[in-house]
Image (cartoon, rainbow, N blue to C red):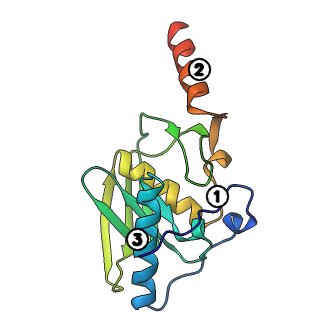
Amino acid sequence: MAYRKILLEDDPVLRKHSKEVVIFDDNLKTLFADLDETMKKADGSGISAVQVGILKRAFIVADRKEKVYCVNPTILSQSGTYNDKIEGCLSLPGKCGLVKRPNEVEAKYQDLDGNWHQRKFVGWIAKAFCHEYDHLDGILYPDRAEKMFDSYEDYYKYRSKHKENK
């Protein structure tokens, strides 16, 4: 395992489309081990291969209960709206934005051995899945944001003021 440098928002690689994974070998397992270590050290809850400069359709999403390794994911359906719109990204450190994401996502993906899985992601992990999925197509969350903030402090000030005006 090795920590890999996370590309920042101005890097043009982040805007490229990732390629399908066709070889499921030890190199793929090493990539995921590196992604996992990088995500942990950066205190993230998801990371895509493109964020470390590897244009492969691969990412990790994690919440308090589980960590899911996704290869060649496809979104089959989406429904509802997740309540918490605040979103950040390891490639845009310190910044955040308000992004509308689905509350439920039905998806299929392969695991590290190439086996297919289909499942429904619900709540926060559905939101994270969509965020990482966007990375594979060169989409960053500001492209979908209703409003952006230069810091979480700015967001909390906005939220506080917004609640007072209700």
> Which residue lies under the disc numbered 1?
139
The amino acid type found where label 3 is placed reads: Cys
- Gap between marks 3 and 1, in whole Å? 18 Å
Q: Is residue 105 left or right of residue 156?
A: left
Q: Is residue 35 left or right of residue 146?
A: left
- Along the line of sight, which residue is nearer the eye, 113 or 144? 113
Of residues 141 and 7, the one drawn nearer to the viewer in this rendering: 7
Gap between marks 3 and 2 measured at Cα:
35 Å
Q: Is residue 166 visible?
A: no
Kind of residue indicated by mark 1? Ile
Query: Mark 1 and mark 3 in contact (Cβ < 8 Å)?
Result: no
Residue at point 50%, 84% (across, down)? 21
Amino acid bearing label 2: Tyr
Name the secondary structure under disc 3.
Answer: strand
Q: Count residues near mark 1 (Cα–Cα under 10 Å), then give few for <14, some for 14-19, many for 20+.
A: some
Which residue, given by chain and number where applicable, does mark 3 sit on? Answer: 70
Confirm whether residue 158 shows in the render: yes
Q: Is residue 98 above or below residue 7?
A: above
Query: Badge 3, how many Cα within 10 Å: few under 14, some, many 20+?
Result: many
Residue located 36% across and 85% down the image: 114
| Disc nearer the start of the sequence (1/2) | 1
Residue named by callout 2: 158
